[in-house]
Image (cartoon, helix red, strand yellow):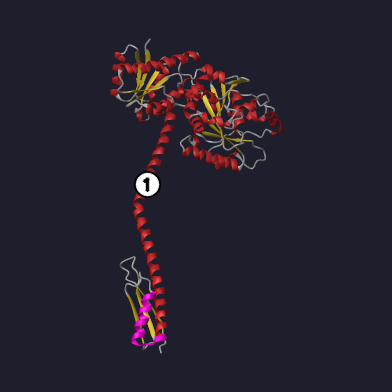
Amino acid sequence: MAVRLLLATSDAATAEGWAQVVAEAEQLHLSGVGRNLDEIQGLLLTDQDSEVLIVDEHLDGRGLELARLLAAANPLLGVVILVDHAGPEQALVAMEVGARAVVSRAASLAESVARLEGVALWVASARAVIGQDTVGRAGRTIAVAGAKGGVGASVIALLAARTLVGTKSVGLVDFDLQAGDLAPFLGVQARRSVVDLVDIATDMPGRVLRETTYEVQGLRLLSAPSHGERAEAMTVRAARAVASALRYQFDVSVIDVGSHLTEVSAAMIEDADQVVLVTTADMPALRSAKRTLAMWERLVVRSPGTVQVVLNRMRKNSEITRQLASRVVEVPVAGVAIPDGGVEFERLMNTASLLEGSTAVSKAVAALVPPLVQPATERSVDEAVEEIDAARRQRQKKHRRSRREKGQAIVETPVVVMVGLLMFFFAFQGLALGMSHLFAREAARESARIVAIEGYAPAGIQHSEQVAHDRIPGGWDTDTHVAVSEADKTVTVDIAVPAVLPWTGWRASATVPATGR
């Protein structure tokens, strides 16, 4: 049976080349070519029997981003990236975006057919295990994060999952790998965890995913490891694969990512359809929420406008209102606030009975959930791509600013160095001038003492001049004049100041009175 292909490329030569490949290979059938985003969406809606989608990496200049979105929205479709040169680096990038393989433009016919048949075989196996015949089914993922520890993000995630039980198949995933506590909340002694899926994440059958989860009152729990140090075994690639598997295993997957940003939690936040940031109605938590949103935006993990901020443990007499909280975190806060549960809610938590009781907290969470679980088709690929474009433009803007700052630094550095050198030379020249005055005065004082003892006879004057020269250090005694005046009864020593700056020509002199015999 021929492998049914869809091709996504805006290059006419590429489309024609693949049409020739398909014509020569009986094992391949080209169902359609999408030259832009609208055509690709239309092909995916009308032709759900195709097994492989080949995405040109140069498609609209954002082929990899489109491949990531299409792979996430169609988890049972084999996405293959068409690259200029196929190698380990390209294969790794393809896996990061959720593709199954890469194929080179220069690949031989036999190599291309073998690669596509391998992907088609995986698709057939996955569809058989899952038991569905279409590629359009893609569940929603909701990531719940805490602004800081202790704000109740895990409880909100648990109650949100409970709200959906009965109407949808629900997965509850604890990706707070070091400090996850969903299993204790449910009274589950977890022997298996999400970390156990790392080794098989790239080829995970639904049976293994079901065996790793625990069924608790209608929902399936995928627990965090009991020992926090095992979190180091989880990789970004495995985390994305687990999230992709959850999409076609459950209608809705609620993922608790904790309050600390790691590479794994960042991947979950980035790929989730909805993100909820839980905070409490106090200024420290609200400031933490603001810093968290700003950090996500700087790291291009999530735009603040796509995050639903939820106030937890609200009291009637609370000084922090929803409007004030919105001004503090600088994004709108959800209209539904979660009240403080009080003693009854605390009792349910302590007895691992949160799913059994009906409290004001669970009712508030139930009112919060419906907007978060709208069908995935309502969020168009166009909107998602626009978000990616906005993130790319932001990265490019930062890169250009960095280049401007770097160029400015290159221009300014010689000027700064020159000014620094001049300041150093002037300081050194001033120090030399001060020392020259000290040496001149000391030499004049010693010469005057000799004159006072030996008198103004030629021998005494000669001796005093010699003493003056001896008192001056060698570096300063290059151009020194000693003058003994019998009329004024004084000795004057004049020294040439060592020149660091050659144009100065400064001299230092000192005159000391002398009394002769």
Q: Is residue 442 visible?
A: yes
**Quarter the N terminus occupies:** top left
Most common SS among magenta residues: helix
- Is 350 rendered above or below residue 77? below
Give the total number of marks visible in the rendering: 1
- Judge whether residue 23 is colored magenta: no
Q: Give x and y (percent) for residue 369.
A: 58, 27
Q: Give x and y (percent) for residue 110.
A: 32, 16
**Along the line of sight, the residue nearer the viewer: 106 or 424:** 424
Residue beneath label 1, please? 406
Q: In which quadrant of the rendered view does residue 517 lie?
A: bottom left
Does 221 sit left or right of 74 as displayed?
right
- Residue at left 58%, top 41%? 286
- Under mark 1, the amino acid is Lys
Does 73 sit left or right of 111 as displayed?
right
**Along the line of sight, the residue nearer the viewer: 487 or 346:** 487
- Is 502 rendered above or below residue 487? above
**Along the line of sight, the residue nearer the viewer: 129 or 51:** 129
Q: Give x and y (percent) for residue 158.
A: 61, 27
Q: Give x and y (percent) for residue 265.
A: 52, 32
Q: In which quadrant of the rendered view does residue 506 lie?
A: bottom left
Which range is magenta? Answer: 452-471
**Along the line of sight, the residue nearer the viewer: 425 or 247:** 425
Q: Is residue 330 visible?
A: no
- Judge whether residue 460 is colored magenta: yes
Q: Residues within 10 Å of mark 1 (few under 14, many from 20)?
A: few
The residue most toward the top is: 1
- Residue at left 35%, top 79%? 466
- Is 500 rendered above or below residue 300? below
Does 455 sit left or right of 360 as displayed?
left
Mark 1: secondary structure = helix
